[in-house]
């Protein structure tokens, strides 16, 4: 398992971040909306915005792989996710909230697709290796699923809006910093090999 993760640490970090933030937002978003003074129906609209974004972004970003490259796409998704998440600290208007959620949800859900492509690129030489890596990737995603709602729930309970936002923003920023390290190392290896 460690050897598998070591071959594509960027993909596993992306899957973890996607699971952590994605599941926290789906599970806790309606509670967050109620906690910050919104209605149940607005919470449902917010959740629908996230899910619709998941469909739209995944289709759009699948096409972007071809034109802008994987590294640029990874950074773009993280910048969109972190930037739109940070806006929740300052924006409470319902229309803006739906738009921000659309960006945030789309970027987060697309991350798993990017991670899958990374696994496919790295482990394409054997079906058994790809199956093992895919299972490990799913495990990384589900580990994020297990931690995200707990951390975000505690943040929401203790610090309200800012606690919820920061409980998603801080882990995403840490993963982005790690990704920068992994991607630079991968690019350096590619340059040496080429």
Image: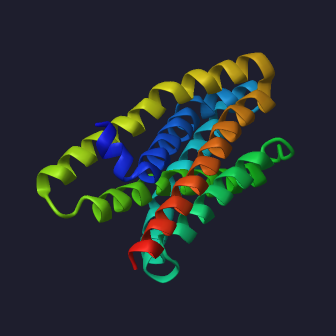
**Left or right of 156 on screen, residue 52:** left
Indicate the quadrant where residue 35 lies. top right
Is residue 102 depicted above or below 160 in this figure? Answer: below
Colour convention of the picture: rainbow
Q: Residue at x 57, y 57 (%)?
A: 107
Q: Residue furthest right?
A: 90
Is residue 67 depicted above or below 111 in this figure? Answer: below
**Left or right of 187 on screen, residue 25:** right
- Horizontal and vertical percent position of residue 179: 56, 53
Q: Residue furthest bottom?
A: 67
Residue 141 visible from this viewpoint? yes
Quadrant containing the C terminus is bottom left
The image shows a total of numbered marks equal to 0
- Viewer-nearest residue: 50 or 48: 50
- Horizontal and vertical percent position of residue 178: 59, 47
- Viewer-nearest residue: 171 or 180: 180
**Left or right of 143 on screen, residue 73:** right
Q: Residue at x 18, y 48 (%)?
A: 131
- Horizontal and vertical percent position of residue 82: 69, 51
Q: Residue at x 43, y 80 (%)?
A: 66
Indicate the quadrant where residue 150 lies. top right
Residue 39 visible from this viewpoint? no
Quadrant containing the N terminus is top left
- Viewer-nearest residue: 19 or 90: 19
- Horizontal and vertical percent position of residue 90: 87, 45
**Left or right of 33 on screen, residue 60:** left
């Amino acid at each position: 398992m460690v050897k598998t993760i070591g071959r594509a640490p960027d993909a596993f970090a992306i899957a973890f971040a996607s699971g952590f933030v994605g599941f926290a937002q789906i599970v806790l978003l309606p509670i967050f909306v109620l906690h910050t003074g919104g209605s149940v129906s607005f919470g449902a609209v917010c959740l629908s915005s996230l899910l619709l974004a998941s469909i739209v972004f995944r289709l759009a970003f699948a096409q972007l792989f071809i034109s802008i490259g994987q590294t640029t796409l990874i950074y773009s998704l993280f910048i969109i996710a972190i930037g739109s998440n940070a806006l929740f600290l300052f924006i409470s208007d319902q229309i803006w909230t739906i738009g921000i959620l659309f960006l945030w949800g789309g970027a987060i859900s697309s991350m798993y697709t990017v991670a899958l492509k990374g696994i496919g690129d790295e482990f394409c030489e054997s079906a058994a290796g790809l199956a093992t890596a895919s299972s490990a990737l799913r495990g990384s995603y589900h580990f994020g699923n297990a931690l995200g709602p707990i951390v975000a729930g505690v943040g929401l309970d203790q610090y309200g809006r800012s606690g919820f936002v920061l409980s998603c923003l801080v882990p995403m920023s840490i993963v982005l910093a790690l990704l920068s390290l992994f991607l630079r190392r991968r690019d350096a290896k590619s340059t040496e090999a080429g």
